[in-house]
Structures are given as C-alpha cells and as structure tokens.
Amino acid sequence: MNVKAFSFGLMLAADVATGQSFAGLGAEADGFAIPQPNPTFEFPEDHGAHNAYRIEWWYLTATLTGEDGQDYGVQWTLFRSAQRPEAAEGWQTAQIHMGHAGLTTADQHFSAERFARAGTGQAGVATAPFEAWIDDWIMQSTAPETEDALSALQLTARGADFSYDLDLQATGPLVFQGEDGYSVKSESGQASYYYSQPFYTVSGALSLPSGDVGVAGQAWLDREWSSQPLAENQIGWDWFSLSFEDGARMMGFGLRDSDGGHFTSATWIEADGTSTPYPNGALRLTPLSQADVAGRTVPVGWRVELPERGLDVETTALNPQSWMSTSFPYWEGPIRFDGSHQGRGYLEMTGY
Amino acid sequence: MTKTAFLTLLSYWRRSPGQFVTLVLGLMLATALWSGVQALNAQARQSYAQASEIMAQTILTRLVEPSGRDISIADFAALRRAGFLVSPVIDREEDGLRILGVDPLTAPPGAIPAGIVSGGSDFTLMTGEQPIVFLRAGTQPPDWADEAQVLTSDALPPDTILADIATIVRLTGINTLDYFLLHPEQPAGLPAIETATELLTQSPDEQTDLGDLTGSFHLNLTAFGLLSFGVGLFITYGAVGLAFENRRPVFRTLRAVGLPLRRLIALLALELGSLALVAGLLGVALGYVIAASLLPGVSATLRGLYGAPVPGELAFDPLWALAALAVSFLGAGLAGAQSLLRVAQMPLLAPAQPRAWAVIDARAQRRRLGLALAAIGFGALATWLGEGLIWGFAGLAGLLGGAALGLPSFLAAALNAVSGRAKVPFTEWMIADARQQVPGLSFALMALMLALSANIGVSTMVGSFRATFIEWIDQRLFAEIYVRADDQAEADRIEAIIAPQVDAVLRSAWVERAVLGQPAEFQGISDHPTQPVEWPLLSGEPEAWAHVGAGEALVISEQLAHRTGLGIGDTVPFAPNQALPVAGIYADYGNPKGQITLNYALLINAYPETPQSRLSLRVASEDVEATIQTLRDQGLRQDQIIDQTSLQAVSLRIFEQTFLVTGALNILTLSVAALALLTSFLTLGGMRLPQIAPVWALGQTRRRLALTELWRAVGLAVLTFIYALPVGLALAWILLAVINVEAFGWRLPMVLFPFDWARLLVLSLIAAALAALWPTLKLARIAPARLLQVFAYER
C-alpha cells in the first residue's frame, strides 16, 4: 500500500479549498463514499477509477537485475485525487492525476513527476482494454481478453534523463489485502479498499544517461482507493514488500503516530496466492541504521519481524539515497534482506 | 570669518531676488523635466517587464498556430501523450482587458507569477467550488467575474486578469486555446517537436517584446527630457555666470581682508550646492507632479498604440528622487564650473568693476563660433556616416548644441547688417544697444532658440506622420465593410446571403510565419476586377501589382525590407519549396511585424489549413447601413463587423493620443524659455541704467525708452525664431529620416506646415513681449531721480 497518496489528496484539498483545515476534511461532509467492510469486487470495472472516492492509485514497483549483473529498481505510480466526487469532461473535471516515476541504481536515483486533469485526455484510466496513463507514461494491459486485464502489462515512463519500457507477466492470482480487500489503517477505523498483483515476472529495457541496459526481475502492483485521510496524529509510514526465495511474499507497513506509536499491519502471501492478514502488533519494525538523505536523517536499514511466520530479517537498501525529490519528497527504493529468510523487496518511507 | 564671508556672499541674492529666482527656476525646471520623463519611462518599463514576465515570455518558447486556426484540447492531449511537456494558455484581449487562463498543473516554472503560485504542486489557482481570479489592485473586474472570488496581486500588470484555465473556460465560455508554453527541459529521447505537430515554435526573441515595440516612443520622451534639461541648463549657466561677475567687487574685498582663495572657492561651491539642493528638491516635487499628470495620457497612448498595459497612477520611487537630486547637482556643477574656475584664476587686485560680463571680447566670440561649427559638423557627420540609433541622437545633439552656441554670432551679425541701414540716430542707438545686450541675453535666447527649434522639429515630425498616416489608411482601407467570421463555414454562409446585396465580396487571409528569422505575416489578397488592390509602393517595378495579381511576384513591407535587407528582385520563400521574387516595397506604418502581400489563391494553396473567414465587402456608400443590418440579422456580433468610417476614426484617435504627450512637453519647454527671458530682462534692467540715463538726459521720454525696450525684445525674438526655423527643420529631418528608420523601420516623407510656424512665431513674440513687459513698465515708471543718480555715482 502506498500511503503517500493520502498526503497528495490532503495537499490538493488544502490548497484548493482555501481556508479548509485538515480537520475539516471529514469525508462524509464532502460527499465522498466511505470504504465498507466485506467488499465484493467486479473486474474489469474495479481496475478502473472510482470517482466517488477521494483518492486512488495504480502503483507498481520492480526489483530488477541487468544484463550487466547490476541491481536496479523501478517505480511507476499513477495517483488520482478528486476535488469533488464527480467527473466531468474537459477542463472542468474534478479529478486530478499525479504521476511518479523512479529508477534506482546502486549509485544513482532518478525521479520524475507529472500532474494532469482527467477529462482532458492528458491522463486517465480506461478499463476496456485496460490502460492507465499520464502523458506518455503508460500502464496498459497486454493480456488476452479471457484473462484478468492485469495479468499481463506493458509499462513505460520517461523523465528528463531516463526512461524505461517493461513487459510484465503475472504468475499468480490477484491478492486481496486486509479482510478480503478491506484494509484498516488506524485504531480509529480509517480504512481503504486494497488489492495487489504481487506475482509479476519482468523483462525489458532501461534507458540511462550511461546507455541502455536490458533487465529482468520481479514486480508488484498495488491497487488502493479510499476517501479517508490518515488519523490526525499519524505523521508518516514505513512500507515493505518482500519476495522470498520459495515464492511466498509479504506486505507489511507501520504507520507512525506523533507520540511514537506504530500501527502495523501485514499480509503473508503463499506462492499460490493464499493470503493471511495479521492485525496491528503482529509485525515489528525496528530501525537499525540511519543515513543522511537530502538533509534529513532517514532509517535506511531495518529489522523486520513477523514471529507468527518465523520471520526475522535485516534489510539493506540498494541505494541509501533513493530519494524521490518530487513536490512532496519521500524515500523509495529496492532492498535486499537476510536473516531467517533471503530475498529482495521494496521499501517506502515518508514523513522524515 | 568663514561664516561672515558666507553670509556676505549670500547677501547678494537678497539684493538680486530676480537672479535668485532665475537660477533656482532654471535648475528646478531642468531637474523636473528630465526626472519627470525618467519617471514616466521607468513606470512604463516596469509594466512591460511584468507583462512579459507573466508568461515568462522572455524565457519560454511557445507553440503557436500560424494560420490562426483554433487550438483545441485534443491538440493539447495529443502533444502530451506524445511525451512533450507543453502547457496550454488562453491569452486574449477583450474590452481592453487581457484574459489569461493558465494550467498550474503543467505550467513550466516561472510562467505563473510568483505570489500567485510558487510552483511545484502549488495549485492555489485551481478551483474548488468557488472560482478564483487574480488581478492587480485598481483593475476593474469584468462582469463575468462576478461569481468568482477576486484576489489581488502586485505581480500582475494592470488590465490583466489571470485564472485557472478551467475558471476562464467556465466563466467566459472561451473554449479554445491560444498557444502552448514549451517546458525548457523536455524529457530524454523525444524526437524534435517540429516532427510531431503542425504548430509553429516561436522562440522568445520572435515574440513581440513590448520593450522593443515601445522603445521608440520612450526614446522620443527621453529626447524631450534631455532637450528640456539642456534648456534649463542654459538658463542656470547664464544666471550663475551673471551672479559671479556681479560679485567681483565682493570677491576682491573678501580676498583683500584675508579670506584664502581656497576657502572662497569652497564657500562658493557650498553656496552653489545649497542652491542645487533647494532647486533639486523643488525639481523632484515638480517632476513628480509633471509625470503624474502626464502618465494617464502616456498610458492611454501606449495601450492604444501597442496594447502595452501601463497603470495610470505613478508610484513614488525614492531611488528616482535621489537620482533627480543628483541631476540637479550635476546641472549646478556643469553651470558653475566655468565661473568657479574664473574666480580661482582671478588676480587678487583685479578690477573690482563688473566687467560688463556680458561684453564678450571678439576672440571669445570667434572661439565660440568655431566650437559651434565644429559641433554642427560633427552632427552632420554622425548623421551621414553613423549607423544606428545612437548616431542619430549624436547627430541631434551636435546639431542642437552647435546651433545654440552659434546663436550670439548670428544675432550680432544680423544686428550689424541692420544697423548700417538705420537712418535716424535714435534707431541706430537702439540697434547698437540691442547688440550690446545680446551677450547678456544670450543664454536666455539660446534656451528660447532650443525650445523653438524643438517645437518646430517635433511638430513637423508629428504633422508629417499624421498626414502620411491619413493618406495611407485611406488607401489601405479600400472596402466599405470588413467581416470576420468565426470560421469558414460561417464565412461561406454569409457570402452566399450577402453577395446579391453588394458589389463584390473579396476574401483575404493571414498566415504568420518567420521570414529570414523575422516574424512576419503573409497577407493573401484577391485579384478582383471591381477593386484591383493597389496602394502606392515606396519603390517597385511598374507592373508590380499586376504581377502580384497574377501570382508571379509578391510585395513586402518597408519594415521587413529594412530588417532583412530584402530588395526588389530578391526571392522570398513563402511556403516550403515555394518562393516568389519581390516586385515592390510598400509602407506599413505602425505594424511591429514585417508583412508580405501575395496572391490569395497562392497563399491558400500553400496553407490549406488557413481559415478563410475574412470578407471584405464593396458596397455603395448609401447601402452601408442596410448591409450592416443584414449582417447583424444573420447573427454576426458587433465585433465581427467593422465599417471603414469607424475603423478610420479609431485609427486616427489612437494616432492623436500617441502625440498628446509630445504636445504637452512642447508647451512646457516653451514656457520655461519664456521665463528665462523674463528673468534675464529683469536682471539686465537694473544693470542697464548707465546706458539708458544718458539717452534720457538727451531728451527721450521714459515712455519712449520703455517702448524701445519692448520692441527690442520682440525684435530679438523674431531674429531668434528666424534662426530656429532651419534648425528645427533639420531636427525634423533627422527625426524622420534617421531616427524613425532606425527605431521603427520606416521612413516618412517630410511635410512642411508654414501655418504652424506662423502660429509659433506669434507665440514666441507674445512670450518675448510678456517677458519684457514687466521690466518695461518698471522703466516707464522709474523715478527720474534714479536716472540722475547714474551721473552722480558714475563708475
């Protein structure tokens, strides 16, 4: 899950509705729909935009290895944030899109950011056939009509000094996070709809200032939408996606609140897609090493524990300077981990 | 000692209030006019800077539609989806208001003024439920902005309203785009944008820069400011010189009682400095008043002529005030340097008499004449050989400076010539007396001469421009009614309906393209039997228009010829792989862009996308009203129909406005010169008693002597006018044939206005008579005892 979109929504809403405070963003008051427990999903419709909800994203991270033997990481995200729960054609639309693209190497980190209005054609999400795009950044389905649209994708993005073009093939089913896709975010009940496709194998090419390089690896797609911002006292989060050598996966996050508490949540995903959610407290996240990043102190090495699964690993960032210098900056990059399990994954940290 | 000496020096001014007033007035006016003009220029420039900053016009390349076809939201999406970072802009003018719709989501950094959005993800502009519009305090929001929240920003120029593009679309109903801003950093690996779109890239230097466009207007103002400064300086120079000469006895006495020379000089410099300070402060105040009262006219002019927004209210800038004070000190320094030098060189026991300061020896006069001729020679050389605006102005400066220096020699020679013919001794005395007075009056007369020649020169230029402009506009506006349809379909529909009612319907089309790196517009005109469009060419082949009609040649505007160096016979590319020879060059006054006129069909073939939506209707004059009514009935808006008469009226009104300020400055300079004359007469009046007393003693009445004074003043004014006339015409010639060409790119034929000269002559006579009136009355009423005293205390 990628909670930074919450912040995107907040930022837009605060800027737009002049004078409105964060506390004034009661979802009910604005007429946005609220995620409810026990959801049922309809595909391909639910791959598309849910304009009745305030925020939504299509979010993909990939851990890759190049022909040159080097590790690489790629991020592609399309956010949607609604000013009002309605869609209109042309300039008058209430739906704003934001795109983030990142590319990480061991010693470099590239990022790019785009903004657009849905309705002008500059950005949007179509369901038949599936395509999410902003400018020439595209995530489009290459799956046969009989399959789930997200089971095969083409993914492109381009920044001032980098671009990439990747083919993704899913080797497992969609996975529903939390309780059948209803994911709770705080003790006071904030929640979202959340499902993932964590089983992609990837091949493609990266274009860097130093030249092009062919890559292969794994990728993870998250789909999430909601209307509720974080609880008022939540200041940031640390989010992990881990891929184990036996084919299993784990998603886990911790939301930090201002008095030092951590609201954690995790989902263990078997290689066949069977998932088990773990409530607050089951997952333990402990910072181990810090790095100076963009003038801040960021914990780039972590101890991640899920005792119920016998998980106890320490993570290492491919590039401790994986800083997304976007409008609201955050740390996002590929990691490796070692300990009770080995493998690769992605880490996102905000609020530092 | 020092204090006493200083008070002694100052006491002179109490005894000669007239000179004090002259000195302060001269310096004050020099300061006021110069700094007033500077204030006007500065205010205007600031507005231009804001206007061009607002869309980062000086930095960002634009994508424009060359043929004026609408740019749509689909064009925007297509370019973005091809990967190019472009940002849409609505930028148009309605009822004198510049409407700017911008997209904060895609705008390149700096495009939207800081203070409205700070860049990045600051989308303050964007609408929530209530739309937001920005404008500068003092700009009247349009009616359609009623339902919006209006916020003010100093970062916007006047008469500009800025809002999110969605707000503009929603409130005004405008639903097409005007251009795209191209982000300076495009993503890696994209093809050249020219291959992806039919839109034309327009780099910042191809865009119309208000600073460039209005440069000549400001040059005009600056020249006037300099001229006024010169006039004021002459006055000050005269007054300072007189005051120093008159105080020779005081200086000698002070030195004799032990005041060191160094301290005397220091005290005199201090005195001059104090005067400069007083005059400077007054000048700043007056300059501000002048600028503030002229600004509304200037801003109306700039807006009308160039569409350049300038606020009508003047901001007070302390830096400007300091600069104005510095100008006052500079003026005092320039005017006093020579006198101070003379005091420094004065022997301790120099004759204590004021050595009729005025009487300049023949050698000095010859030297001055030599200097005058050299200055004029330099001016002529600069004008002939120099290239560029600076040399034009150098020529002007040489001409005017030289002419001013040569004036006393001219007056002396003229009076010499007349005196030989005098038959009556009294007349002969009168002329001789006048000649003796010339040096004393010379600086006031030089000031008058400068004012007169500036007046003649500038009004000749304006008049010539006006006459040419009227004639030109008559030729160019050949059709009785012009219709601008929204699109070709509407134009076709209108043509079908209106054709039976009118003599002819002609089509014209415009395409904008760069030619040899210069922005240019291509104008396609129909070759039609009822109206072979022929306006006179400045130069060209005899059958030029026939060739244009046949599509064998094209004609270009003077501006384009001047800027690109193209001439008759040169080949001009007007479309890819299509070119035609130039058959002629025509005048196109007031157009900042170069223009190319060619056959309509050729243009349309080359640019099939061009909207053919402009119609020119030929109608008998009595049917104009009815035709306009028919057009209205067809649903055309008022702004789509223009009739010739009102178009001409509007053009002329704009023209008149342009030179409103020039007229005001003209009158101001002339008044200053008259004032100088008055104070000079007043000063001389006291000094001249020893010359007048003997004539009175010989039996002439005071009344007759006084009348003589009046006549002499008028006579000197006439001579000065005669001298100023050719100088003024030379000035006009330089303005028209040199400065105009450099500044605007066009040359104007010079037209002479003898009636204006006569009016000016009468004006200057009245000014001289008025200036002499008070001294004359004083003389007429002088107590005989004072005249007798002359003999008692004869020095």
Image: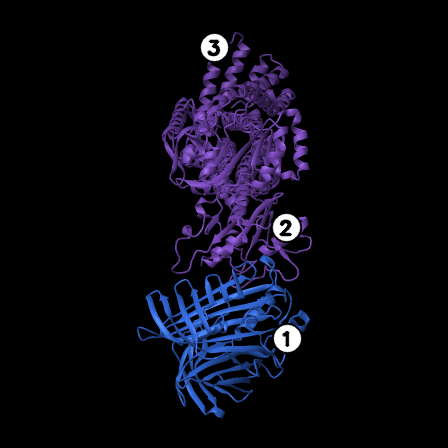
Chain colours: A blue, B purple
Neighbourhood count class around disc 3 (C-alpha, 10 Å): few under 14, some 14–19, many 20 upward:
few
Of badges 3 and 1, the one in the foreground is: 1
Image marks 3 and 1: residues in contact by CB distance under 8 Å: no
Residue A34's tag is 1
As drawn, the residue found furthest toward the front would be A146
Report, in whole angstroms, how far the alpha carbon at label 2 lies from the one at label 3: 81 Å
Residue B420's tag is 3
Residue B172's tag is 2
- Chain under label 3? B
Query: Which amino acid lies under the numbered mark 1 shown in the image of this protein?
Result: Ile
Q: Position of residue B24 (x, y in %)?
A: 56, 37
Report, in whole angstroms, how far the alpha carbon at label 3 lies from the one at label 1: 112 Å
Image marks 2 and 3: residues in contact by CB distance under 8 Å: no
Q: Position of residue B386 (x, y in %)?
A: 37, 32
Query: Which amino acid lies under the numbered mark 2 shown in the image of this protein?
Result: Thr
- Chain under label 1? A
Q: Tag 3's secondary structure?
A: loop
As drawn, the residue found furthest toward the left would be A68
Viewer-proximal residue, A310 or B498? Answer: B498
Whether B104 is drawn above or below B444: the answer is: below
**Badge 1 and badge 2 in a common chain:** no
Whether B773 is drawn above or below B206: the answer is: above
Neighbourhood count class around disc 1 (C-alpha, 10 Å): few under 14, some 14–19, many 20 upward:
some
Could you say which quadrant of the image residue A169 lies in?
Answer: bottom left
Q: Residue at x 56, y 64 (%)?
A: A96
First reached walking from the N terminus: tag 2 or tag 3: 2
Q: Is residue B632 visible?
A: yes
